[in-house]
Structure formats: structure tokens, C-alpha cells
């Protein structure tokens, strides 16, 4: 090989090394890549229904670069208060639990929509039957109004829908069922509002030091609405969508609440930060959970809080304290209020009080498959100005779905 050829090969090698170093610099420390922009929000009734991949933010770095230490760890975390004995429990420390691999959440929507349709068709049939009866006199309109109110739609939304339907019937002069169904669908979709942003914080957030931090989701609500179950089901969804998750058992008052949450996590290989001390400080547990999530570089930390009656001032104040303590080290990105869809107007009163104490970002409606009062969706969104993001449609571990306004209305009118 000539000297000129050797020089050329050396130049090429240096160039390759330089390009590789430049790419590594652009990607940032630890191999992190720049976060992709959030997915577009569905704002019309056209096109396919959204799936979990549409409402969950894109995952930031690859899973293999993070969390191995956290999932395999055996040591507990340092608590903010040593007396609380807060510890991190990994899945392998939960005896008798086999780690499952949840199926991708993208294939669940058809089954869940059919359940919703079976539950809500009584409401839809009643409306369509009245509107297409051909006898839309004053008495018939009163029956329509009563049907809407009984569905928990709320007085304001009911008045708007009544006015719109009366105008269309008067202008068109027809009460054929197909036409009435079209009018009703358009008006109901407008009321349920597909333009609301229903994305869920589910990916690491940027920080000034470039290291990033987990998304923090805080789940709140009254007793018996299914908060812990919703947290467990959401963890399953996130694991199925390749997110690294850590659970915080900040419900330290209900007996076995931490055990229940730990079991949910262990089934899908998710660690839990908890305290075994009865009536431990929930704010300390939540603080340590977020701290462990930051140190373990997980994607999402989900905090399960104790159920509390909305009319108990001291308990509501404590909820605000938990959020303030957590925010000393990390912002809370989501506050999900879990409501029982069967409670109707009482659920609205609960929602108002919770919204006054903590900034609610979204609603999870449980037991929506067990009520024909689907109007609660419209009422609670209007009352709080935040969207319904999640719906529970059964007791199975995977019966949680992103709320789809268009599919919801179509299910009612099927």
C-alpha cells in the first residue's frame, strides 16, 4: 500500500469517528433522544377512533437504557421521614405473584365499545323513539326533555340540545328516524366535545439539567370509586405500551390498600413505594415515590391516594398537602379524578370540591358500562372544564379505555 493510500485511509477513519461523536453529542447525555412532539388530537368525527397510542405521549428514551437497576433493586429508598419506614418493593419481592405481560392495549377498543353500547342503548332508543314518533307535540317534547335530564346531561346542556332539535325539526319538517338520528348524533358529539385534549402525561419530561424526570400522575377521588383499581389498570396499559412505571402507595389509611396496589404492580413487573406503618404520612410516601422514580429514571410515577369524602375539610386539606410536598421536587403533571358514573349529580358535587383543592386535569369515569346515565360525561366536563380521559367498562384487569367522544355517542345511538 502506497503512502498516499495510507494517508487517505487515516483521513476517512478520523472523519467517521468525528461524525459518530457529533451524533452522540446531539442525542445528549446517556443516549437520550429528543422527545417527539405530542400526537395530534382528534378534533372531528371523521377517521378511525383513537387508540392508546393516540392519547399516550411518545416514549422518550429506549427502555433498555433505563430502569434495570430499579426493577432489580432490593434496597428500600430513603424516606423523607425515617419514622415512616417507606420502602421500595420490587416485583420479585412480592411472593406468589407471577409477572404477566399485558397484551397491547390497541386491540381492546372493539370489545369495550360493544359493552358501552349494551349499557347505553336504552337511553338512545328512548330518545329516537320519541323524536321519530311523528307526534312531536308539547307533551312529547316534555318527555324528550325528561329523558335527557334523567341521563344526567344537566339542565344547561339539555336546554341547548332541546333548542337545536326543535329548530331542526321545525326547519326540515321531518321526523324520519334516519334524519333524527343524524341530528341527534351531531348535537351529542358537539356536547361531548371531541376537541378537548385527552392526552395523558406518560413520558419523561425535560429538565434544565438535561437529565429529564418522570411524568407524575396523582389519582384522587372519594371512597369506593375504584381509584386503586384504576391505578392498577392504567399501569397495565402503560407497561403494554412499553413504559417504565413506578407506583406510589400514598393511601396509608385504608387497610391493605398498599398490598392491593403492590399486587397490581407485581403482576406486570412494576415496583411499588409503600410504608408498612399504619397511618404513615401519605405525603412522605408520595415524596419518596417520586424521588425513587427520578433516581430510577422511570417514565411515569403514579400516586394512589386515599379515598376521602368531599365534605371532610381536613382530609381535603391533606390532599392539597400531598401535592405541595411532591412538587418540592417535581411538578405533578396529571391529577386524575376518579368518579363513579352511577352516582350522577352527586358525583358532580364531589368533583367541584376536589377541583377546588387540587388542579384536576382529567376525569376517569368508572362503571360506565353499568349505567344508562351517560350524560354525566357532558355534565362533568362542563362543570370542571376538563375532559373525561379514561373510562372503566368492566371488572377485568384490562377493561380500561381512553374515552372516545365519537364512539361514545355512536354506542348510545346504536
Image (cartoon, rainbow, N blue to C red):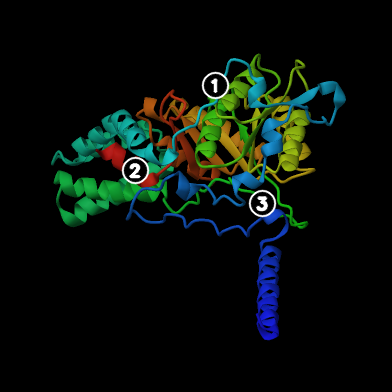
The secondary structure type at the circle numbered 2 is: helix
| Separation (CA) of disc 3 from disc 2 | 31 Å
Where residue 165 sits in the image (x, y, percent)? Answer: 27, 48
In which image quadrant can residue 275 be found?
top right
Q: Nearer the viewer, mark 3 or mark 2?
A: 3
Residue identified by numbered label 1 = 98
Mark sitting earlier along the chain (3/1): 1
Q: Residues within 10 Å of mark 1 (few under 14, many from 20)?
A: some
Where residue 360 sits in the image (x, y, percent)? Answer: 60, 41
* Farthest-out residue, front: 1
Position of 185 relative to 412 (above/below): below
Residue identified by numbered label 2 = 407
User: Closest to the observer: 339 or 18?
Assistant: 18
Left or right of 400, for residue 23: right
In which image quadrant can residue 273 be found?
top right
Residue identified by numbered label 3 = 205
Mark sitting earlier along the chain (3/2): 3
Position of 252 relative to 193 (above/below): above
Where residue 194 sits in the image (x, y, percent)? Answer: 41, 51
Residue 349 in view of the camera: no
Seen at 46% across and 55% down, the residue is: 41
Amino acid at each position: 500500500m502506497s503512502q498516499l493510500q495510507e494517508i487517505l485511509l487515516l483521513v476517512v477513519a478520523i472523519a467517521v469517528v468525528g461524525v459518530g461523536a457529533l451524533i452522540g453529542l446531539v442525542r445528549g447525555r446517556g443516549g437520550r433522544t429528543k422527545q417527539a412532539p405530542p400526537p395530534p388530537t382528534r378534533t372531528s368525527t371523521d377517521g378511525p377512533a383513537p387508540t392508546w397510542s393516540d392519547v399516550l405521549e411518545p416514549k422518550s428514551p429506549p427502555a433498555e437504557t433505563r430502569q434495570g437497576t430499579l426493577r432489580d433493586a432490593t434496597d428500600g429508598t430513603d424516606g423523607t421521614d425515617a419514622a415512616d419506614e417507606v420502602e421500595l418493593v420490587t416485583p420479585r419481592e412480592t411472593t406468589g405473584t407471577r409477572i404477566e405481560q399485558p397484551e397491547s392495549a390497541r386491540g381492546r377498543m372493539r370489545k369495550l365499545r360493544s359493552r358501552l353500547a349494551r349499557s347505553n342503548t336504552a337511553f338512545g332508543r328512548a330518545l329516537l323513539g320519541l323524536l321519530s314518533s311523528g307526534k312531536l307535540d308539547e307533551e312529547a317534547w316534555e318527555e324528550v326533555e325528561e329523558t335527557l335530564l334523567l341521563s344526567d346531561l344537566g339542565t344547561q346542556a339539555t336546554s341547548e340540545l332541546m333548542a337545536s332539535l326543535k329548530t331542526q325539526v321545525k326547519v326540515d319538517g321531518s321526523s324520519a328516524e334516519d334524519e333524527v338520528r343524524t341530528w341527534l348524533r351531531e348535537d351529542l358529539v358537539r356536547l361531548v366535545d371531541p376537541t378537548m385534549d385527552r392526552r395523558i402525561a406518560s413520558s419523561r419530561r425535560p429538565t434544565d439539567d438535561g437529565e429529564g424526570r418522570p411524568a407524575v400522575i396523582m389519582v384522587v377521588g372519594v371512597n369506593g370509586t375504584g381509584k386503586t383499581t384504576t391505578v392498577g389498570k392504567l399501569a397495565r396499559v402503560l407497561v403494554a405500551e412499553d413504559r417504565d412505571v413506578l407506583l406510589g402507595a400514598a393511601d396509608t389509611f385504608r387497610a391493605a390498600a398498599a398490598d392491593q396496589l403492590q399486587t397490581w404492580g407485581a403482576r406486570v413487573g412494576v415496583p411499588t413505594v409503600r410504608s408498612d406503618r399504619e397511618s404513615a404520612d401519605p405525603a412522605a410516601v408520595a415524596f419518596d415515590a417520586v424521588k425513587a422514580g427520578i433516581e430510577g429514571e422511570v417514565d411515569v410515577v403514579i400516586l394512589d391516594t386515599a379515598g376521602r369524602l368531599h365534605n371532610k375539610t381536613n382530609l381535603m386539606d391533606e390532599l392539597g398537602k400531598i401535592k405541595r410536598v411532591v412538587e418540592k421536587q417535581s411538578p405533578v403533571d396529571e391529577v386524575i379524578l376518579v368518579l363513579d358514573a352511577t352516582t350522577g349529580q352527586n358525583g358532580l358535587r364531589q368533583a367541584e370540591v376536589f377541583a377546588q383543592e387540587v388542579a384536576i386535569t382529567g376525569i376517569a369515569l368508572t362503571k360506565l358500562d353499568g349505567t344508562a346515565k351517560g350524560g354525566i360525561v357532558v355534565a362533568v366536563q362542563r362543570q370542571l372544564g376538563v375532559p373525561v380521559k379514561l373510562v372503566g367498562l368492566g371488572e377485568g384487569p384490562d377493561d380500561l379505555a381512553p374515552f372516545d367522544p365519537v364512539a361514545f355517542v355512536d354506542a348510545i345511538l346504536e
